[in-house]
Image (cartoon, rainbow, N blue to C red):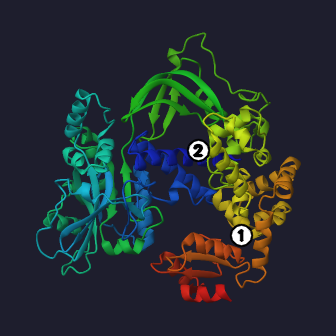
Amino acid sequence: MTSTKKKIDTLRKNILKYEYFYHTLDQSIVSDAEYDYLLHQLYDLEKKNQELITADSPTQKVGSNLLRRFKKIKHFSPMLSLENTFDINGYLNFEARIKKSLNINTSISFCCELKLDGIAISLIYEEGIFVRAATRGDGFKGENITANARMIKSIPLKLNGINIPKRLEVRGEVFMLKSDFITLNKRYKINQNKHFSNPRNAAAGSLRHINPKITAERKLMFSCHGCYFLEDIKEDLSTHYERLMKCVSWGLPVNKEIIICSNHIEVEKFYKKFEQTRNFLDFDIDGIVIKVNSIEFQKKIGCNTKSPRWAIAFKFCSAEKITLLKNVKFQVGRTGIITPVAYFDPVYISGVIIQKASLYNKYEMERLNLHVNDSIIICRSGDVIPKVLSVIKTTRCDNAKKIVFPEFCPVCDTKLLENTEEKIIRCHSGLTCDAQKKKSLYHFFSKKSLYVIGLGPRIINELIKKKLVKNPIDFFYLKDVDLIKLKNVGKKKSIKIINSINACKKTTLKSFIYALGIPGVGETISEKIANDFITLDKLINANILQLNSVDGIGKVISNNIFNYFSTIANRNMINTLIAKVGVYLNHQEVQELNIKKTCFLNKKIVLTGTFNAFSRIELKKILINLGAKVFDNISKKIDFLICGQNFGSKFFKANHLKIKTINEKELKFLIEM
């Protein structure tokens, strides 16, 4: 596994965890700025290493899970998030991309607004009457918070004025004033209740409270930053600014700090003004938002899956603090990579208490030259990920103990080996190292692998501790009496787990490949490999050139796959799983029989839009079983684009490349042939 892959995996894991707490539980365990910076790093790494992009990456979606207590609502159009930058160069690159996209050399008008630190929501008005409100959710579906939104005084239940469209969608931020937040926390303290950590957290919890009366008591505010469905209005609203001003005339609240800029000097002046004065405002902001003002230009520039290309958030920079380094611990990852983590006295930066930071690798440690009890400078670059910037060497004690990278694994005491090309130090003991064994086995039976219901980390750890399992094979020979011996596992649960273990034998090639945990082989790469090789035997016996020919797989991942299947222990384990345990083999034979009879054999296909007779997942499985290779993006190599309703930009790109398109009616006929 490369250091880049490790960085990407770590970023994804942390971001997904933060998204779950932020969007689903309304708990900010990191600041919004830290989250944005992590996501920015992930974007940059994935852009440079596109073969490592997976479908479940945070960069490929918008929000997070939805709370079950609220009904789901589908947005009329996706609620996208914003691309971020933390310096003027990032903005200049954005402006250059805009001009290149429009093929314009002259200045462009931009609308600059404050970026309120709140919760994004969508409001729907029919004939000027407020009828629906929803959270962003996952970007495509949000939570129905209509009853709670009615309790927010700044959201008008009826619009005033003239030229109100039949349907109007208003998008904006719900937030809480700092003064109201302080009052709320004082009241909670008096009543000895748990207080909120910041105004954004308080606003999120209040907006999604199960009791709308509580929402009404919390004094939430709303500010509009965009509106849609204005086609039936008989007046010229050709710019973003004009549309916001129209919203004001209808009685919708819009923050007054908005200006039109025509060059980077004006943008930077607006940014610096509020960077210096933001602490004096009665509401939290974490930057400014810059949008192409022309609606026509916005449409031409378009959006990607995550964000509009015509807008960017220019975020404020972070503070730095000095603290004492207490220790550095060395963590062992699933594939044996050793990562040093610095632990220090807690410091409060940008609204969050932090007490540890990743040091990434041996070379970062050498750069810092860390000693125990060093005074270190900590920052959250871009108000984001905690980072050790430097050491104040003048305060170091004469007898201070230097922290060195270990020669042996901190878990299994195996000699560590360094890959100098990748700058990675790894423990190669694999399943004989408890740290790797636990994580590898959990990965093998996780949801996107050979999913076993109820078999979580706690149970796997206990099975390893009791020496009931050493490798994936052992799980298939477990009995319910073995599981009953474990803590908090009764007869009913043990039978459920055993039944699920037996059921997971019938899986897909994609899931089986992913379950093996080959470095660099995520969900998307697993799917591409399965589509290309079709059978496990062909994959196992593939050479480097054959692996390299798979679209999106580079030399590093090809070598990782080849080396994995070249290892005798790995081949023996796979052979045992298939020949003796019965994993996957029967499913594989059925799949091959289907492929021989299909007209989709080895055709490269992309899907776009929604389908009446199939869900996207169902259709994908059908096509794969018929021998097709399903890809996410349009390129010259694609044979067909299967087009449903509400198709997107893929349709126009396919037309431009003269790729044949198939509608749902034609698709059904071809499937039934």
Measured in 3D between alpha carbons, the distance from the residue under mark 2 to the one under mark 1, in whole angstroms, is 27 Å
Q: As rendered, which of 519 and 600 lies closer to the eye? A: 600
Residue 289 in which image quadrant: bottom left
Q: Is residue 120 above or below residue 117?
A: below
Query: Helix, strand, or loop for circle 1?
Result: helix
Residue 144 in which image quadrant: bottom left
Q: Which mark is residue 531?
A: 1
Q: As rendered, which of 306 and 432 lies closer to the eye? A: 432
Query: Which residue corresponds to the image point at 76% horizontal and 63% vertical from the top-left?
Result: 548
Residue lying farthest to the top in this orientation: 399
Q: In which quadrant is the C terminus drawn?
A: bottom right
Residue 55 screen position, x and y as percent: 58, 61
Residue 262 screen position, x and y as percent: 29, 62
Horizontal side of residue 614 vs 439, given as left or right:
left
Q: Is residue 48 above or below residue 36?
A: below
For disc 2, the marked residue is 10
Query: Helix, strand, or loop for circle 2?
Result: helix
Q: As rendered, which of 396 and 613 lies closer to the eye? A: 613
Q: As rendered, which of 273 and 114 lies closer to the eye? A: 114
Mark earlier in primary sequence (2, 1) = 2
Is residue 336 something that shows in the picture?
Answer: no
Residue 528 screen position, x and y as percent: 69, 66
Residue lying farthest to the front in this orientation: 491
Q: Is residue 647 above or below residue 442?
A: below
Q: Amino acid at mark 2?
A: Thr
Query: Which residue corresponds to the image point at 40% horizontal and 41% vertical from the top-left?
Result: 28
Residue lying farthest to the left in this orientation: 161
Residue 545 screen position, x and y as percent: 82, 64
Q: Amino acid at mark 1?
A: Asn
Is residue 149 something that shows in the picture?
Answer: yes
Query: Which residue corresponds to the image point at 78% horizontal and 43% vertical from the top-left?
Result: 471
